[in-house]
Amino acid sequence: MPGILNCLAYNVGLPGAKIFSGPSSEQFGYSVQQLTNPQGNWLLVGSPWSGFPENRMGDVYKCPVDLPTATCEKLNLQNSASISNVTEIKTNMSLGLTLTRNPGTGGFLTCGPLWAHQCGNQYYATGICSDVSPDFQFLTSFSPAVQACPSLVD
């Protein structure tokens, strides 16, 4: 009979739910991603304004899902996120605004879209992404649109 809809319903069980909390001024929880590694199951939590109010370099927290505690640990990736041979502007880059799993490494990628580099008196906000291993070790950073700054000749 046309017009009949099939629906599936479900309930989310709240008893025993784990609540992870962090600084709301740092936008803790803006992005989340699940990750499994040999040490267990984790919830990755983006905090793109980490460092507020001085700057918003941003960061990512790892939160253990399997342990009885609900304490998250900051990964301190903002200092590792870097591109060599350019003058970086990392203040307010908002690392952790994006989180996605990287099936190639088993880890994850996190991006800071407001990362910029300076060329002369111009600033180019090309963004930066960092690749992190499944055991939370920084691997590399990249910015697909970054260009070398040509030498200025007087």
Image (cartoon, rainbow, N blue to C red):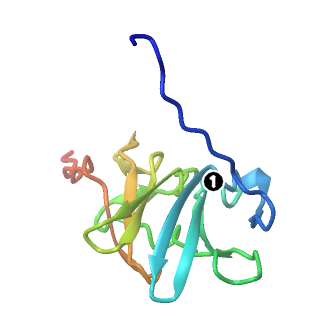
Name the foreground residue: 62 vs 59. Answer: 62
- The x and y percentages for residue 126 are 35, 45
Please give the count of numbered marks on the rendered protein. Answer: 1
Query: Relative to residue 66, is residue 1 drawn left or right?
Result: left
Residue 112 is situated, as x and y percent measured from the top left of the image, at: 47, 53
Residue at the image point whose x is 40% and y is 13% from the top: 1
Residue 120, percent from left and from top: 34, 46
- Name the outermost residue toward the top: 2
- Dividing the picture into quadrants, the one containing residue 72 is bottom right
Q: Is any part of residue 20 visible from this angle?
A: yes
Q: Nearer the viewer, residue 104 or 56?
A: 104
Q: Is residue 53 visible?
A: no
Report the front residue among 74 and 115. Answer: 74
Which residue is the site of mark 1?
56
Give amino acid for label 1.
Answer: Arg
In what element is the residue under mark 1? loop
- Tell me if 62 is positioned left or right of 132 in this view: right
Looking at this view, name the residue that lies furthest to the bottom: 39
Q: Residue at x 21, y 45 (%)?
A: 154
Image point (38%, 78%), residue name:
133
The quadrant in which residue 47 appears is bottom right
Vertical position of residue 58 compared to residue 35: above or below: above
